[in-house]
Amino acid sequence: MAACRCGENGYGKEEAMQKLLDQYRDYKGGLIPVLQEAQNIYGYLPKEALQRIARELRMPFSKVYGVATFYAQFHLKPRGRNIVRVCLGTACHVRGGAKIFEAAKEHLGVGHGETTGDLRFTLETVACIGACGLSPCMMVNDDTHGRLVPGVVGEKLEAYK
Amino acid sequence: MKNLEQLRVRYREQYRQKLSRPRIVVGLGTCGIAAGGEKVMEAIRERVAAKGLDVDIDFTSCIGMCYREPLVEIALPGKPGVIYGDIYPDKVEKLIESVVTGRPVFEWAAMQIVEDGVTPYEGLDIMESAPYYEKQVRSVTSRLGRTNPESIVDYIATGGYEGIEKALKMDRQAVIDEVKKSGLRGRGGGGFPTGNKWQFVYGAVGDKKYAVCNADEGDPGAFMDRSVLEGDPHAVLEGMMIAGYAIGADEGYIYCRAEYPLAIKRLNLAIAQAEELGILGDNILDSGFSFHIKIKAGAGAFVCGEETALLNSIEGKRGMPRVRPPFPAHKGLWDKPTVLNNVETYANVPFIIRKGGDWYAAMGTEKSKGSKVFCLTGKVNNTGLLEVPMGITLRDIIFSIGGGIQGGKKFKAVQSGGPSGGCIPAEHLDTPIDYDSLGALGAIMGSGGLVVMDETTCMVDVAKFFLNFTQLESCGKCTPCREGTKRMLELLQKICDGKGEIEDIATLERLAKVIKNSALCGLGQTCPNPILTTLRYFRSEYEAHIIHKRCPAGVCSALLVYVIDSAKCTGCGACARACPAGAITGEKKEPHTIDASKCIKCGACIQRCKFDAVTKA
């Protein structure tokens, strides 16, 4: 079977993983950056990738799994191409962040932590993205959208394919 | 030892030349970008190119006026710089016109920045006397919104790296003494004297030591550290280098939360620039002192803002706190003596070394010296970043700088210190704020987030909001926090649902006290504060929820009753058609009524009614 070539820079995902593991093999405290990079490669952390990380970094699988499930950033299930994070922090809360979340939920037809069937969007909430001066706000991928009202949420989301 | 004098002279000249040319500067901190700053930048580039104007286009970070973002500054040679607020692409054409005519567009201008020897424009606020800035000081935030954060030329030309140069010529103990003299206390919330902390690590025995920067700013409502990292990244590096030199560390880590991609990008850039000039790295300026800085991106856990949890996370473990003692000063990162300070603390250090501890100690109150950066958010007119001398009153911050409450509503409380802090009511607005006075009110200084609440905010709901947060973020290591937050949240939920019993208040108070005294780390020890302060200052609201089954602020939906004012109702039937539960009935052109037993309290009728006849109470 032909090797997967869908990774960046002409590398396949396997090659990218190997390069990553070689880079961090003797790096003190490298597990978290390895998991972060591995998630960039796969879009999430498949079981096989976690097993391989444990083997190659010479640590128990239980430790890798423990760290991967402790932090909110890591995901063990496939995610959408676009990550929508609606802020429900204090400042957004008092300015109606919950209504923004409702609007996003309604527009995408999925709930918190869920992914649309076409893998286009994953909807999440976040405790604060530090743009409180512009509350209520949400992040789509690395873009921050501020001063939202429920009516414009759908339009903002539609810009992401 | 080499010195930076030659470089400094050259960079100052470059910087002077930059300021002597006509320029348009766009604010591109995260807040500016979120408000659409990049589109404005694009439009400006396009218009300037189309007109073939000889104007420089530059960017800067957040000057603090988030409420007027996107911000654009236009500075013409020999004239004051004019800061324009709320500039969207459709306004760019007219702004560019003002560059050609030399006449500012006064109706969009927020204020002007007047350098020495320049005549101000008439009828426009000068920054130092503008309402938002009049009571502020600009020390640690002095470069924010003024220099290009991605340019080391701007940093060095404005006094940057003078601190480390001066420190390297000093005795290590003398550096620590200078910081002690300044009276600087930890800006991350704890308020521990920075000089003393350094002294412990200096005195600790170890072949290797570390200087760690806590940039895991997780408190909802706080973005001071983000603003400093995005606006003056070199100052943080310089502060860490000075700390490293003083305590004898050759390696530093910045633990920055992954939610701040722009801050991480600018830090990486700053590190590369400083390394290239030999200011950071091996044998800095031929002094024999070496210092390397690495960045660790957090992975999304609020508890990692706690110092020992943060160290575990850098080591690649689960971010759970450690039992203290031993303290990080003796056994920190990889069990080596470690000094841990937050972003704002480090960013203050270069100024203190450069200008002297006495200069810093001249600001502030007896026990809390210097200035503090706050983030003012919530239901206040002017939201943004501000820096004030310690000892200013909350009233000054909220009503002078913040411009009062949105929509002319009544002030109810200000929440200081995030989930670890407390709600301060109107009767304490005149307290001069410092670490100790806020502690006495049951709140904490925290990292500096101030969320303003008005009469439409329910204090029980706010307490529930924070408990929901801490309960989700509790790492689960110690029982009081893991189980206690859950039980307190259940009680608050019960009260908000209208099922509260009067004993619940006593149970909450007892639980809060036990958790405060027995939790392992700061997260657990402080998480009851929102409950304790709301119970202390707003007990009547709890009682209204429990005894009268009413939510005075009209927030807790289970306790609201929707009614139609028969005097205002025209009988148009819009509400009845909007009601998904079929709870509204009435004859055409006759006042309608809501059947409370069918009403699901969704609020659709209120939104639909054109006559304000539907109210909730």
Image (tube, rainbow, N blue to C red):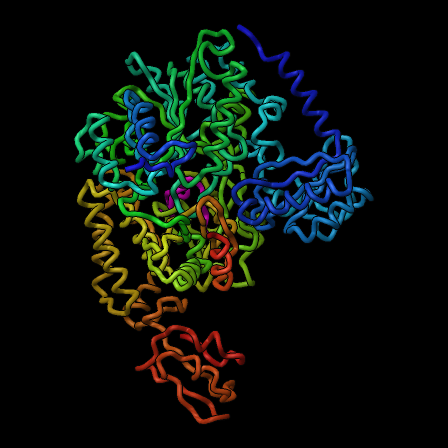
Q: Which of A83 and B155 is in front in this view?
A: A83
> Horizontal and vertical percent for residue B103?
80, 45
* Vertical order, B414 against B320 (above or below): below
Q: Which of B70 and B413 lies nearest the eye of the viewer?
A: B70
x, y percent for residue B514: 20, 47
Q: Does residue B333 appear anywhere in the picture?
A: no
Residue B491 appears in view = yes
Segment tinted magenta in the rendering:
B436-451
Q: In this view, does B38 lie to the left or right of B454?
A: right
- Above or below — where is B226 with respect to A131? above
Which image quadrant is residue A13 in?
top left
Q: Residue at x 37, y 55 (%)?
A: A118
> How many numbered marks does the figure carry?
0
x and y percent of residue B154 in the render? 62, 26
Residue at 39% of width from left, 85% of height from top? B584
Residue drawn at point x = 66 percent, y = 40 percent: B128
In the rendered structure, the answer to whether residue B372 lies left or right of residue B40 reads: left
Quadrant housing the C terminus of chain B: bottom left
Q: In this view, does A38 lie above or below B243?
A: below
Residue B442 location (% of width, % of height): 35, 47
Residue A137 forms part of the magenta stretch: no
Examine the rendered structure and indicate whether residue B410 appears above or below residue B4: below
Check residue B439 for magenta coloring: yes
Who's the residue at 28% across and 13% down the image?
A: B205
The extreme right residue here reads B101
